Image: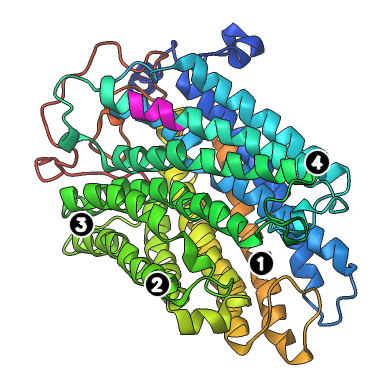
Amino acid sequence: MSTATQTSLALEMPSDTYLNSSYGVKSWFLTGDHKRIAVMYIVSISLMFLLGGVFATLVRLELLTPAGDLFQSDTYNKLFTMHGVVMIFGFLVPSIPVTIGNFLIPIMVGARDLAFPKINLASWYIYIIGMIFMLAAIISGGVDTGWTFYTPLSTQYLTTHVMFTAIGILIAGFSSIFTGLNFIVTVHRMRAPGMTWFRLPLFVWSNYAASIIMVLGTPVLAITLILVALERGLHIGIFNPALGGDPVLFQHMFWFYSHPAVYIMILPGFGVISEIIPCFARKRIFGYSAIAFSSIAIAVFGFLVWAHHMFIAGISTYSALIFSFVTFLVAIPSAIKVFNWTATLYKGSIHFDTPMLYALAFIGLFTIGGLTGLFLGAIGVDMHVTATYFVVAHFHYVMVGGMLVAYLAGMHFWWPKMTGRMYPEAPAKLSALIVFIGFNLTFFPQFILGYMGMPRRYHSYPPEFQVLNVLSTAGASVLAVGLLMPMFYMLWSLKYGEIAGNNPYRATGLEWQTTSPPPTHNFHETPIVTQEAYDYESQTEEVEVVG
């Protein structure tokens, strides 16, 4: 590399970035900078993901053999419960909004920071406190109710450490509310001049829709957990039929939050894919308005389908029919996104860089997850498979094949912007391939197991199911390798990676118009927006995508 080139690259690495270490460690824990808070969230949720992965590994090891000979049944109950609790409330729910969203949304709308920087920092501390309570429950012996905390099991006094876990989830819920409130106010009040609603990046639309769910849905979960605590501590008959309560009421309240919470997880993932597809297809996104409004439609419909989790819980036939019908309706806005992404790819100049590989994997895996959700929305099929591994497979195709893959896509896409460094492309592509193969080897056999009748939550099973369980556990080993690889090459890139430049992918959007990494206040001058979000056709210069 010539001296002139080195000088040019050095000029692209500003000295006043959020990564400046001269301020000391204390400045990180007292920061109001949304970018630093996003980094602290990335570290925190990564640790929770690793912990949840340990529990998943132990579950899969138990299921290698049909006899249930590695753990006792009560220990196995604790393992799958803690896997679900840690992964859902510690990783999946906060994942993209508090990390990539926290980092990018102010920059994407042309703001210097989020509307309430102190509340943003408080949300991280609240999240950490919530996770400490969850960890205390694990260290104290765990909880064995399943991550749904169904009553009356969770309200019985002898059930292990429910309150520690419930308090942790309750506290972490306030973190989600604060984040959602911050995003909503920022999008409404802090957009740059010229940044109209229909010039907003679709990533902002998706996180805006998810924020509505956070603010409206999370308090319902908080109230539900408080009622569990009151019944458990004071023996007030709310959910326990022995005390005059109704256990189905708990399911109504829990799923009124928890089904919309699926969209808290997946909507930001939709936004990530909507940014990556047009960039690497070098085309304007097809149907911008339809994708934007479909995000809002998903947020609305998400509150209307909760009882499809309860077809076997004794709800009336008429209400089951209504919820089944609305479940099919909620698939429409998701299908709009998939069709529009596919139309964007049509005749595009496609570059198969790592973010694009993850985006294509997302489309395939999420489509399988969405289509199998329609099976569960059909009352007759649901009654056959709802308590089986079919549901486990469906959920993981949506959450892991969808949200986690989208998270990896987004981290790879914006890593150069966050750090100013490029990761090595070859191992990154290999990791994406391993994740895709390992995921399908892990979870597709579970569709077959569920259809054959293998119940979930059991640590022993009939011998005829062993071959598919061995295949699933082997796939989990492959998947684990693929998921651990980015941790190593991304950390390596922080010191040894090629300097990225401000816009290595020649992408549109305000985040690519500032330096890499961004300065402390994002922009040296307030940007003025004069173009739509995905104006790739106007780029007449030949594009060189790094990789």
Tell me, yes or no, whether the highlighted magenta stretch contains residue 183.
yes
Determine the residue positioned at 30% across, 45% down: 275
338 over 221 or under it: above or below: below
Quarter that holds the N terminus: top left
Q: Name the residue under label 1.
A: 476
Q: Nearer the viewer's eye, disc 1 or disc 2?
A: 2
The image's mark for residue 349 is 3
- Residue interval drawn in magenta: 180-185
**Residue, x 32% and y 36% (percent of image)?**
504
Q: How far apart are marks 4 and 1 (CA)?
A: 40 Å
Q: Earlier in the sequence, mark 3 or mark 1?
A: 3
10 Å neighbourhood of mark 1: few (<14), some, or many (≥20)? many
User: What element does badge 3 sit on?
Assistant: loop
Which residue sits at x=76%, y=65%?
59
Gap between marks 2 and 4 measured at Cα? 37 Å
Label number found at residue 324? 2
